[in-house]
Image (cartoon, rainbow, N blue to C red):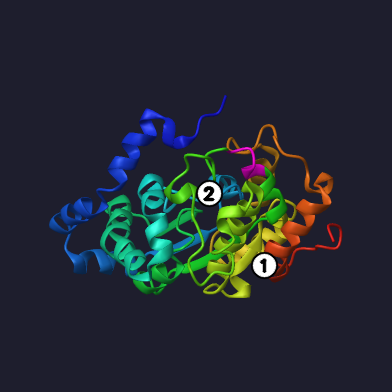
Amino acid sequence: MRFPYQQTIKTKLNKIVSRTWRISAVFYKMKYQQQVVEALLANTNIFFILSTGRSGTQFLSNLLSQIDDRTLVMHEPDFYYDIGVLEKSKNSKQYASDYINNFRKFSIYDRIDGNEVEGYGEVTGTLRFHSEALRGVFPNAKIMLMSRDGRDVIRSVMGWPEFYGKESKGAYNLTPQQDDKYFDKWHDMTRFEKLCWSWQNSNRSMLSLIQPNEIFQFEKIISSYEYFKTRVLDKLELNVSEQQWTDSVNRKSPNSTKQYDFPHWADWSESQKETFMSICGPIMEKLDYDLTEIC
């Protein structure tokens, strides 16, 4: 039986730790000189590949981590800190900027300092509301969006009861702000509808700051090496051989869904299909997904 994250002792402790990022930031600033930190980061090839949950971030980070010893690629390295601030960062640009500038900047420096690293990258769904802050703090960094078909994401997340469950809070229960058209409807929305809203809201936020040529589809990077090379590797100035790509594609990700609790979207009820199209359709079209089979 799968238990919600927030009900485990380990997660409760990690959530407590995540609230201490401001304390950690103070120690970082005592330990490192701001000018030294910024100088090293300015000379490092930094990139962030943003996405939503259940969208292939673990697979891609594992693949890119094979590049070489001088490029450090990580998957959500500050997961509990990022999750702990996700709700506040979504609702406040200033808070998001403070978090990246005063904590995450130093945590990245701490990882690469003294390791002769020339490149650093993160593949993450936990910084999806920080794209503007990342551009402000890391002006030379490449920031990209990896999309995944919303129908597959929602199908996967429907099997994770910690999202929009009865006791869900914070990052697992994000809600619309007052200017969102779903704000007044939220109380009466089903869990399926809320997950649809969450997917489109996350992607809408990233799309507002990430250009079309910085977006690529998860489905295509696992089906075509040429697409992967052209849309990802060449833009990030990275090198992964076709054999490495083939081996990774054939090796199932340890984070992939083993068994779905929710049917494939082709078997959704007409009401569910209409709900998805109403909430997610416009963003799906912007991400260049074919909706003809669900209409």
Does 219 sit above or below residue 138?
A: above
Classify the position of the C terminus by image quarter: bottom right
In front: 189, or 171? 189
On whether residue 119 falls in the magenta region, the answer is no
Label 2 vs label 1, nearer the camera: 1
Element at label 2: helix
| Amino acid type indicated by mark 1 | Ile
The residue located at (32%, 53%) in the rendering is: 112
* Percent position of residue 161, x then y: 57, 37
CA–CA distance in space, label 2 to label 1 = 25 Å
In the rendered structure, which segment of residues is drawn in magenta? 156-160
What residue would you read off at disc 1? Answer: 283
Q: Residues within 10 Å of mark 1 (few under 14, many from 20)?
A: some
Q: Residues within 10 Å of mark 2 (few under 14, many from 20)?
A: many
Does 128 sit above or below residue 152?
A: below
Q: Quadrant of residue 116?
A: bottom left
Question: In the image, 110: left or right of 253?
Answer: left
Q: Look at the magenta stretch and give its main secondary structure.
A: loop
In front: 21, or 244? 21
Camera sees residue 47: yes
What residue would you read off at disc 2? Answer: 61
| Amino acid type indicated by mark 2 | Ser
The residue located at (39%, 62%) in the rendering is: 89
Q: Which mark is residue 244?
A: none
The residue located at (78%, 48%) in the rendering is: 265
* Percent position of residue 97, x then y: 34, 68
Classify the position of the N terminus by image quarter: top right
Q: Residue furthest left?
A: 30
Question: In the image, 275: left or right of 180?
Answer: right
Element at label 1: helix
On whether residue 157 falls in the magenta region, the answer is yes
